[in-house]
Amino acid sequence: MQKNQILLNGISAEELKADIIKGIKDLIENHSKKELQKPKYLTRKETAKLLKVDISTLHNWNKQGILKPKQIGRRIFYSLENINEAML
């Protein structure tokens, strides 16, 4: 027997291949779902760059209620979901 050889009894090569493919698909699907569930937040600078506006424009939009920033300490963040809603 070779050093890195694995012996499987009771499963065909096709069944093993199908199980591996199913496992990989499940991992990809679960990872995609987790990525979709995570709220994405951008800094003021990233948001301004994304929207191609100045930071002072973001400040004005905040005051007008167009965007709803989240503040953590002295830092301000914008959720991608809120940015997308404001663009509609």
Image (cartoon, grey):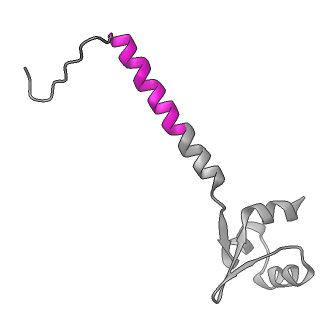
Q: Is 39 situated left or right of 23 in this image? A: right
Q: Quadrant of residue 74?
A: bottom right
Q: Is residue 25 magenta?
A: yes
Residue 28: x and y in percent read: 52, 38
Residue 42: x and y in percent read: 66, 70
Q: Residue at x 87, y 65 (%)?
A: 86
Q: Residue at x 19, y 19 (%)?
A: 7
Q: Residue at x 74, y 74 (%)?
A: 48
Residue 49: x and y in percent read: 71, 71
Residue 54: x and y in percent read: 78, 80
Outermost residue to the front = 10
Q: Is 46 situated left or right of 18 in this image? A: right
- Residue 81's place in the image compared with 69, above or below, is above
Quadrant holding the C terminus: bottom right
Q: Nearer the viewer, residue 51 or 33?
A: 33
Label the magenta part by its dominant secondary structure: helix
Quadrant holding the N terminus: top left
Q: Nearer the viewer, residue 46 or 23?
A: 23
Q: Quadrant of residue 12?
A: top left
Q: Is residue 80 magenta?
A: no
- Residue 62's place in the image compared with 29, above or below, is below
Q: Nearer the viewer, residue 46 or 28?
A: 28
Q: Residue at x 39, y 18 (%)?
A: 17
Q: Which residues are magenta?
A: 12-28
Q: Is 66 situated left or right of 52 in this image? A: right
- Residue 25's place in the image compared with 51, above or below, is above
- Residue 88's place in the image compared with 41, above or below, is above
Count of picture labels: 0
